[in-house]
Image (cartoon, rainbow, N blue to C red):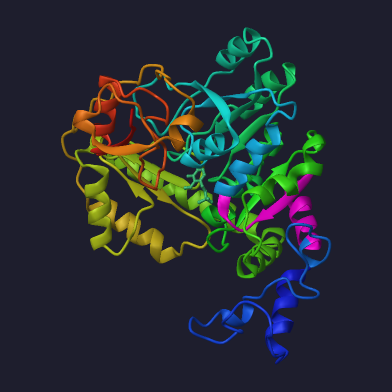
Amino acid sequence: MRTPVSDFIERYAKSGISRFHMPGHKGKSLLGIEKYDITEIDGADVLSTAEGIIGESEKNLTSLYGSGKSFYITEGSTTAICAMLAMIKKTDGEKTHILAARNVHKAFVHGIALLDIEADWLMPKESNGILSCRVEKSEVEALLSSSDGKYSAVYLTSPDYLGQMADIKGISEVCHKYGIPLLVDNAHGAYLKFLDESIHPIDLGADICCDSAHKTLPVLTGGAYLHISDKAKEFIDTAREKIALFSSTSPSYLIMKSMDICNRYLSESFRKELAKTVERVNAIKSFLSEKGFEVYESEPLKIVINAAKSGYSGKELSEMMRCAKMEAEFSDDDYLVLMISPKNTKRDFSRLKKFFGKTEIKAEIKRDFKPLPYPVREMSVREATFKKSEVTKTKDATGKICASVTVSCPPAVPVVISGERITKEVAEALLYYGIDEIKTVIG
Ligand SMILES: Cc1ncc(COP(=O)(O)O)c(C=O)c1O
């Protein structure tokens, strides 16, 4: 596979040309990589139109994913999520409504605030926290059949932070029966296309999805894809202008170079390396289960341990791992989440095995998270987001209205969303997640 963006930058870096253009570093080193950091000079194409080398590289990406069209984004899935929402916003001035599984990333909440979209929520039924939200196809069917065409799209996050996968196939069939698209936040699943059998959202029936290439592929932070299925071609023509609404006009060529070279890697050795990595991860998961750790069934490249069940908090385990020269992706009082990729080495795996081999299971720490009741909406997300607000101690916040989503990143999944009443249950849930201050609407 050709790597036109990378080749152009390499040639330019070696050319000795005097740079009378941005960026101000002129290719000279403070960091060591500046020579590759160029701008949209002659021959370098323009990401927002992509008719030259970037266009060619995006065609490579499109063929790798078998989509109708795949686009590069250099500001993460955060921008891709806003662009997806802009694509389904009604054009006739009528209010747009979307039906979304509640475990959205905060980018979704910011997107609907900026675009003035209203969301109705599919709430989690299980009491295992806010990070996952299992949605049954029948639930979506029941809501769509009784909503009289209210919704412009359904939105799912899959895989979620705990590696849970949604029933994209089933739910996309329901969406299509009611003539609306399924949007998927696949930030954690760019690699899913390259498993022995693809379980990438586009192959399962999603119409539009975003992948954070940087989360699971060897791509620089910020690199993301927006894919449109070939069954949803009506979204292709306006996609670039919607992406541009939320993007910088100075996209990073370093990130595009990295995505361009990654295409070649995906087309060559990645599948084989991925299959081997999945085997290694499965072996570690079995080892952990045999030791007595409760390992969540999850997407292939995550290891999710219910730490509390083994007598630890997730944070305690991650601190212990840090002392053994390992850094986890995420931990809270309940869970420890590890993200693996083919770039993890044999040494990484043996450190993991040695560490958990020595870690004894203790008596379960009882945790009690009650599923949240359906949220009480007092004003729109947009109205609350842009109203005057103040910081309130969570213990004093009962009865007030949430102004902005207060969540740490990761996992950036909100307990309460702008415009919702902070009930006693919500305040308890915020405290459960260690959020002791929240922005509330004044007046
Ligand atoms: C589920 C989910 N969606 C979206 C995002 C945003 O992705 P990015 O960091 O690529 O902007 C994240 C980031 O952590 C995420 O976990």
Q: In this view, does 86 lie above or below 75?
A: above
Q: Give the image location of residue 410, x and y in percent.
A: 39, 47
Q: Give the range drawn in magenta.
A: 55-77
Q: Give the image location of residue 211, x and y in percent.
A: 60, 47
Q: Residue furthest left?
A: 363
Q: Give the image location of residue 121, x and y in percent.
A: 50, 22
Q: Is residue 315 above or below residue 41?
A: above
Query: Is residue 120 in view from this perspective?
Result: yes
Horizontal side, residue 356 vs residue 61: left or right: left
| Residue 261 among those drawn in magenta | no
Look at 63% across and 13% down and name the residue there: 144
Horizontal side, residue 353 vs residue 268: left or right: left
Q: Residue 255 occupies which quadrant of the picture?
A: bottom right
| Residue nearest the observer in this picture, 416 or 400 | 400
Horizontal side, residue 430 vs residue 248: left or right: left
| Residue nearest the observer in this picture, 368 or 90 | 90
Look at 78% across and 58% down and name the residue there: 60
Q: Which residue lies furthest to the front in this view?
A: 443
Horizontal side, residue 60 vs residue 201: left or right: right
Q: Give the image location of residue 288, x and y in percent.
A: 33, 44
Give the quarter of the figure containing the C terminus. Answer: top left
Q: In this view, does 140 lie above or below 50?
A: above
Q: How many labels, in total?
A: 0
Q: Residue 266 occupies which quadrant of the picture?
A: bottom right
Q: Is residue 200 above or below residue 374?
A: below
| Residue 57 among those drawn in magenta | yes
Give the quarter of the figure containing the N terminus. Answer: bottom right
Query: Is residue 334 in view from this perspective?
Result: no
